[in-house]
Image (tube, coloured by chain):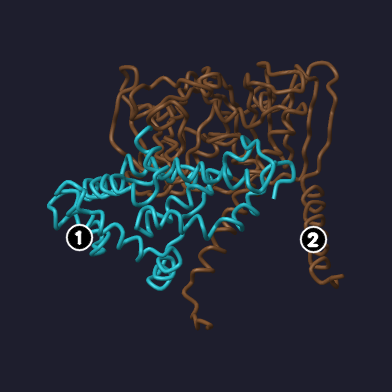
Amino acid sequence: MTETRHDTGYDRLLEDFGRHLQEAEARAGSSQRRRRRVAAGTVVLASLAVGTLLLTGAGGGGRLDIVAQAKAALAPAGHVVHLVTTSHMEMRGGSGAEIVGPEAEENTPRVTERWSTSQPTRWRVASAVPIVTAHGTFTGSVQLSYGGGTEKTYIPSLGTLDITTSVSEDTPRVSLSNGPLGTDPVARIRSMLEAGQLHAAGTGTIDGHPVKRLVGEELNLPLRAPHPPWPVEYDVDPETYAPVRFTVEEVGISFRGNTGTPTEVVDVNTYEALPLNETSAALLSIHPAGNPTVVHHDREREELTAQSARHRAHDQRRRGRQAPVG
Amino acid sequence: MADDQRLDVGALYARHRDELLAFFVRRTSDTEVALDLWGETFAQALAGRGRYRGGTEEEAGAWLYGIARRQLARYYRRGSAERRAMTRLGIERPTINPDTEAEIIHRAGLNEVRQAIAAGIAMLPEDTREAVTLRIVDELSYPDLAARLAITEQAARQRVSRGMRTLGCVLDTQTLTEALQT
């Protein structure tokens, strides 16, 4: 006896979920391949993430004066903004703030120094980060810079200078590739302020000092795994509106053996706006010592090559499906 | 799919997707909870595939069901299904319409399981019995069940999961054992 059935959506449900699973596997595979490249000798650029913070989000509104002042403090016309920050992770809302277990090793406070200017966008970031090589992991200095479509990465301990051209400043690679706040956190925060994604949320106190607080939510961004909105807090000096602290709660992320929400905390130790002149402009560029090995990359060409490879693979798959059996 | 992994999650999914969903439906009598557990199990398999040390299809299936039973045991203990791996991987749990739900129930043979549950319900304490009867036999939603019993939805979920755990002897002895041990 045959049974007559109508489409209940059952098969579609299972196929859809299978596709989501496959897409997630592709994302995971991609990030794993990135990690392997790191192990082969390049530095973990993403490790700068620990020293920075993600600030994007929805919302908006709030008092324009605070937002405008905070924005102006981060991009004063004709100045180079110099920031020194110390960042660490802590658990919030759990039984203990201190992280225990495997993640604790990665959680040593990290000091990062940044110089940036706008119109046009240029920045340099210097940080001590874990450098992973085929011979082990050690802490070393790393510098990254961006300006005029060229991104540079300099690792003194390895004696390498990677130069990538054709990099647009508004590509996710530049703004987001290196951690929660991106390679240039100042630009990231400013873009949040400009987009109305941070809004005034009263005042607070940090280490006994009063601050004005802006809050928002970091939503899913390109090149990142989707996640629930992450609450973001941006504290500024009530008089100068200079940045004091950034925090982002990574809701939905858990660290084994810990309770609560992993929270990135970036404290601003130094903030100054230097007049843009020959001396301060030099701070925006990397000045390698000695003769590092220079490797050139062309982002545009690499993307075209990758695209071409994808098309070839697609054609091969299609031909494979059409090939006669037997 | 990643070539360098010992475990082909896509193939594992294709082999076990239907039977694993039925496994959860029969053991929770709740399609929503079952879909949570089912999705989370595959997400955990994907997230943890680097730890897989087996080689054959049978070993892969056994490994998957190990994850499934741990998920189920945790649900029996806590009254709620975990979605951590799905969230972390950015995988959304599927939503269903009444037609799909009816087919899931049909394929799992849930109506027969419900009869077995109804038969075993006498062994439950009174408050748990009432919660399980309203949820599993009368198919009240959790909000309605909570309103009927004048308790919170969370308490209602816990009461039902507690009852299901007790009824494990008519459902799955191994799962019950794990729930009691962990």
Residue located beneath label 2 in the image: A311
> Is disc 2 placed on a helix, strand or loop?
helix
Does residue A185 lie above or below A82 as drawn? below
Question: Is residue A143 toward the left or the right of residue A274 in the image?
Answer: right
Count residues near mark 1 (Cα–Cα under 10 Å), then give few for <14, some for 14-19, many for 20+: some
Which colour denotes chain A?
brown
Residue lying at the far left in this picture: please name it: B150
Residue under the image location 63 percent in, 27 percent down: A125
Question: Is residue B149 toward the left or the right of residue A260 in the image?
Answer: left
Q: Position of residue A59 (x, y in %)?
A: 38, 49
Q: Position of residue A269 (x, y in %)?
A: 48, 18
- Residue B144 image label: 1
- Residue A71 image label: none
Inspect the image, locate mark 1, and give the three-letter code of the amino acid beneath it: Asp
Residue under the image location 47 percent in, 22 percent down: A268
Which colour denotes chain B?
cyan
Which of B64/B58 is in front?
B58
Chain ID at mark 1? B
Which of A1/B76 is in front?
A1
